Amino acid sequence: MKRRVVITGIGPATAIGIGKKDFSAGIYDLKTCISEIPKCYELNYTFKSRYFVPKPEFVLTDLIHKSVEGMMEESSRLSVLCAKLALEDAGYQISKAEKHMQVKGLENCPIIIGTGMSSLQTALESYSAHMVGVDMSESDSESRTGSGSGSSSSSSSSSSSSSSSNSNPNPGTAGSGTRFNRMVIPMLMTNSPAAWISILFGLKGFNYTLNAACASGTFALGEGYRTILSGRSDVILAGGVEALVEKNGAIMRGFDMLSTLTRAKDGRPQPFSQLRSGFLFNEGAGCVLVLEELERARNRGADIYAEVVDYEACSDAYSIVQMEPSGDSITGLFQQVTQGIKIDYLNAHGTGTLANDDIEAQVIQRIFGTKSTQPYINSTKGILGHSIGASGALEVAVTALSIKESRLHGNRTSEPMDNLNLPLETIETPIDYALSASYGFGGHNALILLKRYEENE
């Protein structure tokens, strides 16, 4: 008998809400959290895009000591928070152990976390300190807690970070207060978001991160699905995190110089709109999901959001930053996944960039026909902005919630593109099959197909 995989826990952390309850309320209320870029971003550069989505604010001191939190870059802090939220949502008990924590029944649980970029704040500070010859004494207590992580929530890290910021008004010059962080290597390791989950929750199954740019979270969930389907494990934590926080806006500048960011006067990216001009930069978000083999979930009485029934991925083999104009690779992916299945809802990639939305729209029309025969289509990035490696995981979570609750959020879009089935308000509708789509820089494409779970099946 073929094994079946279901989603039993959802752990999102975003600016509009942390945890399933607040996140879900924000999504269905079409709530946004958009901030104007600070003046310090433009000391040496004038931005074309004027707005961004800030990272969520939180602390982990209810779980771990502040000295441990101070050894984490922001992406690792997000991954730990999201794992905790997902485990609790799935009904697992987290208890204090001799070292950190333990989760009953998950001692050998694997972990796969997608991330698009390594956070750069600590690297930039430490590089600046190295170049001016400022070192931190081995006897300095702050060095032992990994200060300078850029985490505003950790007292052990904020003292070094603030001194660096105050003494360094010019982002291109290291000031006398900049310190070299002795934990810079483990903080920058791209495996750290998955490793910290394993360490802090005592999960001894295999764990790793993967990178597929903006599709990283979707790839991680897809590989988690395949892990259970193959029998390697009965449960897995999988998802995506991203933290592009940098005090002077250097990372956002990189995207701005590629002309990928929205130039809207109010910051709204408006995916699939005639008025779109680029995506809204999100400096930090994450989401971890609990995937389980169906019988295991049933046996422990878990509440099931949706069943994962397919996942496929491919490459455009075209450009490092542009989608292949014909959309042929993506079209083939849709044909492979949707064959013989009526799709009720598509959570589209929908960044709001001119070329990408146009190519994606053409693929949708090629696969599903005219507006009257298309599934409902929405873009979660119109609400959350684009959180790169976290976006796919957040969108799969939204898709699963939509199936479970028989409703889907509207599109924050005016003057929508022609011939697309884009509801502009949150609507209630039964959803049996739904797709979540992600496409990333480098030509990484992925689709995950979910279906409604029925207890009598």
Image (cartoon, rainbow, N blue to C red):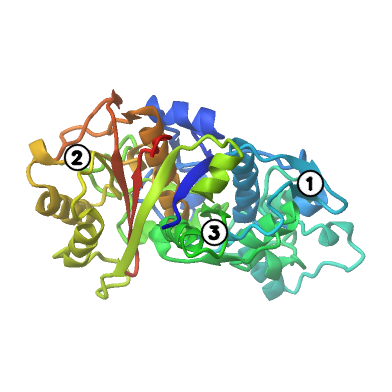
Q: CA distance from mark 1 to mark 2?
A: 45 Å
- Quadrant of the image occupied by residue 32: top left
Residue located 39% across and 35% down the image: 454
> Residue furthest toward the front?
1
Mark 1–mark 2 CB contact (< 8 Å): no
- Residue 77 in percent (x, y) is at 65, 50
Residue type at mark 1? Ile
Q: CA distance from mark 3 to mark 2?
A: 30 Å
Q: Which sits earlier in the primary sequence, circle 3 or circle 1?
A: 1
Residue located 39% across and 53% down the image: 46
Q: Residues within 10 Å of mark 1 (few under 14, many from 20)?
A: some
Q: Residues within 10 Å of mark 3 (few under 14, many from 20)?
A: many
User: Would you name the residue on which mark 2 appears?
Assistant: 375
Q: Residues within 10 Å of mark 2 (few under 14, many from 20)?
A: many
| As drawn, 198 above or below 83 | below
User: Would you name the residue on which mark 1 appears?
Assistant: 64
| Foreground label between 1 and 2 | 2
* Element carrying mark 3: strand
User: Would you name the residue on which mark 3 appears?
Assistant: 113
